[in-house]
Amino acid sequence: MSSNNQSKKYFSVVTYCLALICLLLGLFLPVFNGKSLLFMALPDAFCTTFGITMNDMLGEELTRTQSFTLPFVDKSIDLAAILITLYGLITAIGVVMLIPVIAAKSDKKTANVCAYLVETIAGVILVAYTVLEIHWFISLSPATAEFNWDYGVIGIALGGTLLMLILQSFKYKGKSGVMKFFLFIFGAAGVLTIFNIPKLFGLETTTILDGKLWISFFGDTFGINATGTIFKEGMAASETLFGSADTLAKVAMAAAGLSVVMALVNFAIDIFAIGASSNKGTHIVDVIRYLVETLLVILAVIMIFVLNNDVKPGLLMYILLAVAIIQLVIASIRCAVYKKPEETAENATMPTSFVDDTVNVAPLAPAAVSQPAPAPVATTIPVVIQPIVTQPAVASAPAAAPAPAPAPAPAAHTPEIVYTAKEIYNGPTDAFISRLTDSEKIEFAKLFLEKINGSYANVPDYVVGGDNKDFFASIFIYLGKFRSLLSDGLMNKIYNELNLLN
């Protein structure tokens, strides 16, 4: 088994176990809302979520709640209870998933997939809970000094899970993982712009530029408050937010509210994208979602100015616009420079089965040879043994004329007997070479070890017993060059080895 695959497996197991420990600590550390255990409030959260009457013996009362009225159905739910229930559920699933993560074979991606699913889902749930925490701090706390942050949840559980997810992305995705990390950071900055930043960070002023620009989303309103007002009041919220019920005010209200929603949605997608594989389709989706967010913020800014009243776009709305534009530019560049996996040696992947569907066209002239003929090797020259044919002596008659000699038999009736010695490979070997037949070993050694045709540009040297992932990937990157040189059997075994390394 490849040592590279084995190291990836160990890395997945270690980081997944650390993320799982962080999730468990968030439940069992006595720091929930001061000094309680969040685990003890799980039964109440579960019962509240599903409308079940709780038995007092099942646990403690959930001390933090957040009522939210669903639009169009006029039904109230408790967001805090739902998120805490989901947090406990994904942690329990994570403990169970530890079995396939540890038991998975190194040549499979089971460990990576299980770790990715648990960590990303937990990350999104905990980010949503953190948004509630910030909202409670700003809106529900009578004094910031009296508010108890749930450090076990938003610090250890969320921080540890996201850190492990980012480390896995750096390990497995390389440069792509770094770019996803930057998009994630900008997404987090965009989410912060929807809150009351002066109160959150204890700023003494709420305006800049001599009071000409509010540190807010628009006017003295913040994005999360505006969106909550829209959900509560519907279209009538335009009167509350802009003092007008005309169409322009409603368009401005809708654009501002949807900007906040898109910032939250895009950040959730950014979390899922950290560990996910990228392709052309995902890059196009990234461009579209960042473009939509950018256009919504621009529309909100324009419509607020068109209203021509005392409400003006605030600093945080401009920051959100800048963040969205930066993310759009990064996503567009990644989409423009994207190459298919088989075109980059680091990410070369092939279909589930290798099929050479190229039509072989006969050359116009027999002398046209694209590759020099391989030099003869003494051990491969067939041994030809001609049979020795002895003619019997003819006795001469003393008196009679000698009998005419019989006509020689046609050459076609004397078949040539050819004995070909079996080729034996006695060269260096490793795990891959040992899986080849003798003829494939000799073929591989001539082309890539002895290099009878010379070195191949952009193809790294094959190191016997070393890490040759880039070498195998390059064979398929420059498939047109090697299709005529390699037999089908050797080509398929090279492809299978590349699959194992991936």
Image (cartoon, rainbow, N blue to C red):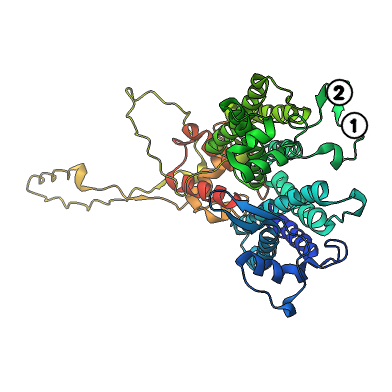
Label 1 secondary element: loop
Tell me which amino acid carries mark 2: Gly
- Residue occupying the point 63% across, 32% down: 253
| Residue 254 locus on image (x, y percent) | 60, 34
Residue 40 left/right relative to 497: right
Q: Position of residue 281 (x, y in %)?
A: 52, 37
For the residue marked with disc 1, what is the amino acid? Thr
What is the crowding at mark 1: few (fewer than 14 residues within 10 Å), some, or many (at least 20)?
few
The residue shown at (61%, 55%) is 113
Q: Which residue is mark 1?
A: 205
Q: Nearer the viewer, residue 227 or 100?
A: 227
Few, some or many C-alpha atoms within 10 Å of disc 2 (few <14, some 14-19, many ≥20)?
A: few
CA separation, marks 2 and 1? Answer: 9 Å
Q: Is residue 317 visible?
A: yes
Tag on residue 48?
Answer: none
Q: Is residue 379 left or right of residue 179?
A: left
Answer with mark 2 or mark 1, whichever residue precedes in sequence.
1
Where is residue 151, by image quadrant? bottom right
Q: Are marks 2 and 1 in contact (CB under 8 Å)?
A: no
Among the 4 quarters of the image, the one containing residue 97: bottom right
Outermost residue to the left: 400
Look at mark 2 in the image and give the residue it sits on.
211
What is the residue that sits farthest to the bottom in this orientation?
Answer: 57
User: Which quadrant would residue 267 be assigned to in this image?
Assistant: top right
Total marks in image? 2
Residue 464: percent from left, percent from top: 65, 47
* Image quadrant occupied by the N terminus: bottom right
In this rendering, is residue 344 above or below 150? above
Residue 276 position within the rendered picture, expressed as x and y whole percent measured from the top left: 61, 46
Q: Is residue 307 above or below residue 20?
A: above
* Nearest the eye: 185 or 54: 54
Q: Nearer the viewer, residue 170 or 218?
A: 218
